[in-house]
Image (cartoon, rainbow, N blue to C red):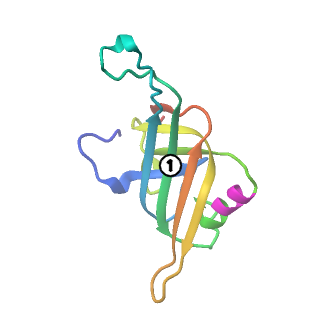
């Protein structure tokens, strides 16, 4: 059943392929458009822009695990994609656990892993931060 109204951010997740990135504590989608200056003397003293290139990225932070589960995407998988210079299909959508919520919006596209940080502070859980940069179109649709 589709999510309605204001909802809890815990439901938003990042998936690589069909696997949820494991143990995430936060995630975000950023979409932007370049607006090249098109101001001329005929602009009457007002700035003018044209629509230029669009770009997008996804970031996620969480608690790191190195234990392969077969159903979650873990830090080792993120490193493998980065090290192999392989693009991955990423999705930003709602889920209950690892099951996407039918009828909700999903943004998806192909991306490269731009960065992966793993932090291990004394007497604290190991954390990770990963950034994916889109290559090509970001699409918006609904989960089936």
Observer-nearest of 111 and 89: 111
Left or right, 82 with reference to 50: right
Q: Front-most of 14 and 59?
A: 59
Give the residue displayed 45% in from the left and 28% down from the top: 35
Taking the spot 58% from the left edge, 48% from the top edge, the residue there is: 18
* Residue 1 location (% of width, % of height): 35, 40
**On the picture, is 80 further left or further right than 73?**
right
Judge by depth and name the residue closer to the eye, 144 or 11: 11
Task: Tell me: residue 102, above or below residue 45.
Answer: below
Instruction: Determine the secondary structure under disc 1.
Output: strand
Number of marks present in the image shown:
1
- Counting other residues with Cα less than 10 Å from the Cα at mark 1, is it few (<14), some (14-19), or many (20 or more)? many
Furthest residue in direction left, as rendered: 5
Give the residue at mark 1.
Answer: 58
Above or below, 18 relative to 118: above
Considering the whole magenta stretch, tell me its main secondary structure.
Answer: helix
89 displayed left or right of 12:
right
Is residue 82 highlighted in magenta? yes
What residue range appears in magenta? 78-83
User: Residue drawn at (60%, 66%), measured in percent from left and top?
Assistant: 75
Residue 54 percent coordinates (x, y): 51, 32
State the image quarter where residue 10 is shown. Answer: bottom left
Task: Please tell me in which quadrant of the rendered image residue 5 appears.
Answer: top left
């Amino acid at each position: 059943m589709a999510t309605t109204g204001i909802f809890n951010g815990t439901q938003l997740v990042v998936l690589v392929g069909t696997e949820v990135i494991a143990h995430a504590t936060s995630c975000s989608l950023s979409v932007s458009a370049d607006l090249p200056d098109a101001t001329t003397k005929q602009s009457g003293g007002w700035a003018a822009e044209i629509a230029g290139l669009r770009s997008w990225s996804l970031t996620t932070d969480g608690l790191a695990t190195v234990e392969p589960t077969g159903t979650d995407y873990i830090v080792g998988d993120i490193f493998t994609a980065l090290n192999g210079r392989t693009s991955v299909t990423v999705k930003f959508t709602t889920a209950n656990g690892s099951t996407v919520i039918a009828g909700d919006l999903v943004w998806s596209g192909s991306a490269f892993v731009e960065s992966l940080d793993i932090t291990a502070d004394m007497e604290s859980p190991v954390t990770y931060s990963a950034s994916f940069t889109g290559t090509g179109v970001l699409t918006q649709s609904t989960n089936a």
